[in-house]
Amino acid sequence: MSRALFVCFDSEESALVTGCAAALGLPFDTLMLSGEGGAGDKSFVAGFEAVPPADGLAEALLSLSGQYGRIAFVSSMRSKDLAGRLAGLLDAAMLTDVIAVESADTFHLPMVAGSIVTTAKVTDGTLVFTFRPSNFAKDLPSTTGSTEKIALTPASRTQRTKAAARSGGRPDLAQAKIIVTGGRPLKDAATFEAVLGGLADKLGAAVGATRAAVDSGIAANELQVGQTGKIVAPDLYIAAGVSGSTQHMAGIKDSKIIVAINTDADAPIFESADFGLVQDLFTALPEIQAAAKGT
């Protein structure tokens, strides 16, 4: 347990580790799977142009990760895929979505869709965990030590046949200060982009979607916000046509301000919203966008 390793998929993630590292209180190194940079005493650079599938990558990480008592990842779908496989191969304990670190062996994490917070204590051995960076201090000074290139040779049984980027240059959901999210009432992908995209671009916001919108093919999977999607904590969260399911609210509860727009005055999201507007989103969002243009 004398050292920690933070595994980062890209340079954006490497900027998010310092708060958790400070709370952990252990000397740490960073492994950059793609991109450069990294914080800590040493930064290992794997140099992948595209991060390989998790099955082979977990096996390739065994040699390096076996030297550390704590191995941490920024919470995401892909990090949980890799972290779970790595923990199994290391025969290590595993925690997901850590929101606070009391000490190097005591952690706090949400359960039951965020309705309770539990304390987990690791009594022995290695721990692999993912953490929500929005719950830790930001903009902490970080030390940048030596950099070492590392050769990882994953032998994956999984083959990636296609990769598509759909962000359109908008902020990443996990780091965005403003998020505009839409639900199933947006009907189709073209309407989703036309109605939400214009407002998001005007506000410099990221675009999110409910699970129902994703399952209906209205929005891409990487835009899903909620317990089974991305956990977010923006300064402003605008939810249009979102009913407020338990799993969705678990993913946005740390937002500073929640604005809900829905035609159903009894929608559960109004119970958690700071501001609510009972109106058709197809009327409200264009009016908000027009007002924003005048500012």
Image: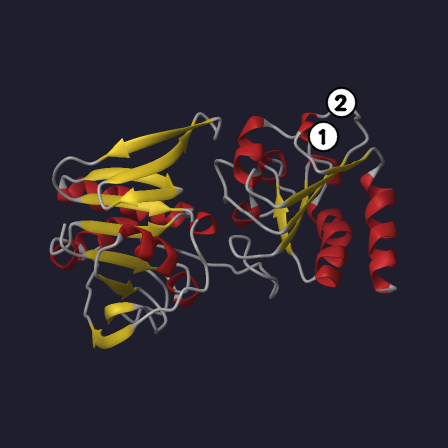
Classify 10 Å Cα crowding around label 1: few (below 14), some (14-19), many (20 and above): many
Point out residue 7 in the picture as x, y percentages from the top left corner: 29, 58
The mark found on residue 262 in the picture is: none
- Please indicate, yes or no, whether residue 208 appears anywhere in the rendered image: yes
Q: Is residue 28 left or right of residue 180?
A: left
Q: Please tell me which residue is depicted at 49% across the width and 35% down the height of the picture.
A: 227
- Quarter of the image where one finds residue 30: bottom left
Q: Amino acid at mark 2?
A: Asp
| Element at label 2 | loop
Point out residue 54 in the picture as x, y percentages from the top left corner: 29, 50
Quarter of the picture holding the C terminus: bottom right
The mark found on residue 270 in the picture is: 1
Q: Viewer-proximal residue, 183 or 238?
A: 238
| Element at label 1 | helix
Q: Is residue 135 above or below residue 155?
A: above
Q: How many numbered marks are there?
A: 2
- Quarter of the image where one finds residue 240: top right
* Mark 2–mark 1 CB contact (< 8 Å): yes
Q: Amino acid at mark 1?
A: Phe
Q: Please tell me which residue is depicted at 68% across the width and 25% down the height of the picture.
A: 268
- Please indicate, yes or no, whether residue 52 appears anywhere in the rendered image: no
What residue is shown with label 2? 266
Q: Viewer-proximal residue, 88 or 146?
A: 146
